[in-house]
Image: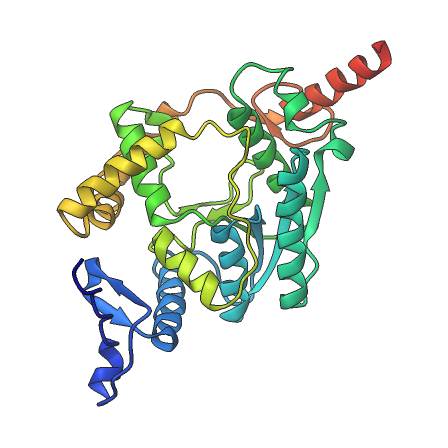
């Protein structure tokens, strides 16, 4: 066996005449950084992303959609680290100990930040968790879960007066989902594929401050800062397709460094404006207010209110 490769020295430390081992070497940037300089680089890059896309102002209230995973936990942490007024909202999906562990990590981080997250439990709010609710509607557990999450995040943001909802989507997420939706020509999605979606039609502004960060960078930042997070995947998640497109992007990235970044951000610059200009034509159907809860809905009664009624009827009939 050959000798293990030596760690590269921190590039910024070398400029100061110091020899300090790096904790990461980012090939796409040709940049090796020690712990101190990596943390600084990470935070500066997030702050620059927020400014570049005009995501929010320093005095705006931000609601972070947290799941207990590394991305959203890191987002909540780094926004507070940068001085923003960021609170968190967690949805307990009722998926056994997976949801319990995820909630514990969110509460743990809240204690570190001195903030109490808002928590909604589907079993209390709707009457059942995702394992039961998926049986009442067509589609996969993921599609049902996604629609319920969007509803809950919009509702809590509107009810509590938050101007912005922030999610932990990263560069790997965005580049792989862009590839998937281009291959399948999902025009509705492509017309809304942007790190900032303005407040409209009863929905708060949605932003993705980690869009320039990779999964590797986010995980390392979380570990170096002792940010609590769960590494478990949702047991109901249909991740085969998601992992396939991520694997494809990783394969291309290994062949041509910087592809993920160029692919996504060149799309935003050169192609997104075309799709965005056609948004009204591509996105079918008008939204109205749900007659029961008042939230935006494509029908008179929204999916969540229909689910509540179905769960109620099932319990009364049993």
Name the foreground residue: 41 vs 202. 41
For the N terminus, the quadrant is bottom left
Q: Is residue 68 visible?
A: yes
Residue extending furthest toward the bottom: 17
For the C terminus, the quadrant is top right
Q: Quadrant of residue 227?
A: bottom right
**Residue at the (40%, 55%) spot, across then down:** 210
Residue 289 appears left or right of 269: right
Q: Looking at the image, is 242 positioned above or below residue 81?
A: above
**Residue at the (53%, 43%) spot, across then down:** 232
Q: Quadrant of residue 316?
A: top right
Tell me where residue 255 appears, x and y as whole percent: 13, 45
Q: Looking at the image, is 278 positioned above or below residue 80?
A: above
Q: Looking at the image, is 55 positioned above or below residue 299?
A: below
Q: Looking at the image, is 82 positioned above or below residue 53?
A: below
**Residue at the (51%, 51%) spot, across then down:** 72
**Residue at the (72%, 30%) spot, across then down:** 293
Tell me where residue 180 appears, x and y as whole percent: 30, 30
The total number of labels drawn is 0
Tell me where residue 65 appears, x and y as whole percent: 56, 48
Tell me where residue 219 appears, x and y as whole percent: 42, 57
């Amino acid at each position: 066996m050959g000798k293990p490769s030596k760690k590269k020295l921190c590039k910024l430390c070398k400029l100061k005449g110091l020899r300090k081992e790096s904790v990461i070497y980012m090939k796409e940037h040709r940049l090796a950084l020690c712990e101190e300089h990596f943390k600084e680089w990470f935070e500066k890059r997030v702050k620059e992303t927020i400014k570049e896309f005009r995501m929010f102002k320093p005095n705006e209230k931000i609601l972070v959609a947290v799941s207990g995973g590394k991305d959203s936990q890191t987002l909540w942490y780094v926004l507070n680290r940068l001085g923003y007024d960021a609170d968190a909202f967690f949805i307990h999906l009722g998926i056994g100990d997976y949801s319990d562990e995820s909630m514990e990590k969110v509460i743990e981080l809240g204690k570190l930040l001195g903030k109490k997250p808002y928590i909604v439990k589907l079993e209390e709010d709707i009457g059942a968790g995702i394992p039961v609710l998926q049986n009442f509607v067509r589609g996969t557990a993921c599609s049902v879960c996604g629609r319920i999450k969007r509803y809950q995040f919009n509702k809590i943001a509107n009810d509590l007066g938050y101007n912005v909802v922030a999610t932990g989507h990263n560069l790997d997420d965005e580049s792989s989902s862009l590839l998937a939706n281009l291959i399948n020509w999902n025009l509705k999605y492509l017309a809304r594929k942007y790190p900032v979606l303005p407040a409209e039609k009863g929905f708060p502004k949605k932003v993705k401050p980690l869009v320039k960060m990779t999964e590797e960078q986010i995980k390392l930042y979380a570990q170096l800062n002792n940010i609590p997070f769960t590494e478990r995947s949702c047991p109901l998640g249909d991740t085969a397709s998601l992992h396939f497109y991520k694997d494809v992007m990783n394969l291309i990235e290994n062949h041509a460094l910087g592809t993920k970044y160029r692919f996504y951000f060149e799309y935003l610059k050169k192609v997104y404006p075309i799709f965005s200009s056609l948004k009204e034509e591509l996105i079918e159907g008008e939204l109205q207010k749900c007659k029961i809860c008042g939230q935006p809905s494509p029908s008179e009664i929204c999916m969540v209110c229909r689910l509540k009624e179905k769960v109620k009827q099932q319990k009364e009939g049993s």
